[in-house]
Image: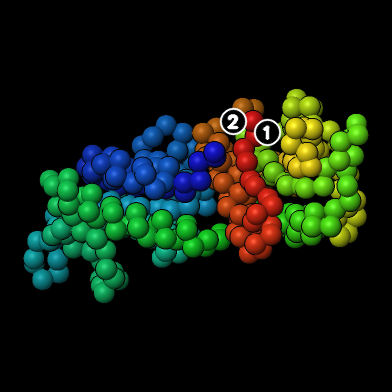
Amino acid sequence: MTDLKPKIFIGSSRAGYAIAEKVKNYLSDVGDCFLWKEPGIWEPNRSTFDNLLRMASYFDFGIFVATADDLTLTSDDKLVVEPRDNVILEMSLFLGAMGRDKSFLLVEKGIKLPSDFDGIYMPRFEGNDDGSIEGACREYASKIEEHYRLGHLSLYPTTALAIGYYKNFVSGLVDSIQNADTLEIDGVRFTDFTLKVVVPSDLQGMIREKASMFYRRHGFVENAMKTRFRKHPAWFQLDSKNAPHAIMYDMPSTLTGIDDAIEMILQKGHQGRTKMQEIIEQRELNNFRRVLQIQLDKSPFAKSTVEIIDEF
């Protein structure tokens, strides 16, 4: 099954990178975590600021580790321990782009944060205590899991595509299945139908062509199923041993174009696929599946009739 974990960006100072690595380990059960120093995260020939703005739209969540890095002399001649300025700036960029439910700060105990953070609860940890770091991560892990489980939608391209696919095709097909005509092939009658929506393994090329190759590779039979709007071509897996049950397959061609849109966003001027492009594509496929499942769950009949599967 496709990994439906959210994509999490983890930022820190250079001095705090070892703790950031521990944070990645502790959060790996709830998300696919990417550290800021990993290959392919930063795009060459772009400023740090520009890269951060772009990453804020690529990832589902951002977690920043504020460690005791700097000694600062205050206006009243007091020495205080503060995190590196860039960590606070980067967290603030993600906060503005993602919102407070998707951008988080893990704070080492004893450091002073800007006064704008006064009154905001943030988990704190002891830098030399792995149990303390894990406990702080656990608080955000619960929040991330809840946010994802409750189906908070983001304005990704596939959000609209999944809703449109359900309303314009799946919903009508599900209604028709309840009163479907008998399908007879080679003297075998099929009257009970289920639909399997096939999520492609990637977004390269025309999805319609990929779908056609998938149907023929598995020997599916083409026929037509009438929806509330029109007859729609459908591909069936028909086995006389399973009659009267038949399985329909559909790979959503509405996903065509997402790959081109991603390349436009990335302003690619080269061939090949970058790591960041692969991250975004997987996020879009995961989001399509997730939003479509939310639509299916609203209808008991659709939920029992339709299954979302991976390309095989």
Question: Percent from the top left, x then y, of residue 3?
Answer: 50, 41
Place of residue 22 in the rendered image (x, y in percent of width and height, measured from the top left): 26, 41
When the figure is inspected, residue 245 is found, relative to residue 215, above or below; the finding is below
Q: Is residue 270 above or below residue 265?
A: above
Could one spot residue 199 in this view of the protein? yes
Looking at the image, the residue that sits furthest to the left is 78
In terms of depth relative to the viewer, which is nearer, 271 or 289?
Answer: 289
Find the residue positioned furthest to the bottom. Answer: 119
- CB contact under 8 Å: marks 1 and 2: yes
Few, some or many residues within 10 Å of mark 1 (<14, 14–19, 20+): some
At x 51%, y 46%, the residue is: 4
Please name the residue that numbered disc 1 is placed on. Answer: 204
Amino acid beneath label 1: Gln
Establish if 107 lies above or below 239: below
- Compare residues 63 and 269 and report the one nearer the observer: 63
Q: Is residue 270 above or below residue 1?
A: above
Quadrant location, the C terminus: top right
Q: Please state if 201 lies on the left or on the right of 119 as rendered.
A: right
Task: Tell me the SS state at disc 2.
Answer: loop
**Residue 34 got which mark?**
none
Q: Which circle, 1 or 2, is nearer the viewer? A: 1
Q: Is residue 144 left or right of residue 304?
A: left
Q: What label sits on residue 273 in the rendered view?
A: 2
Residue at the image position 45 percent from the left and 38 percent from the top: 41
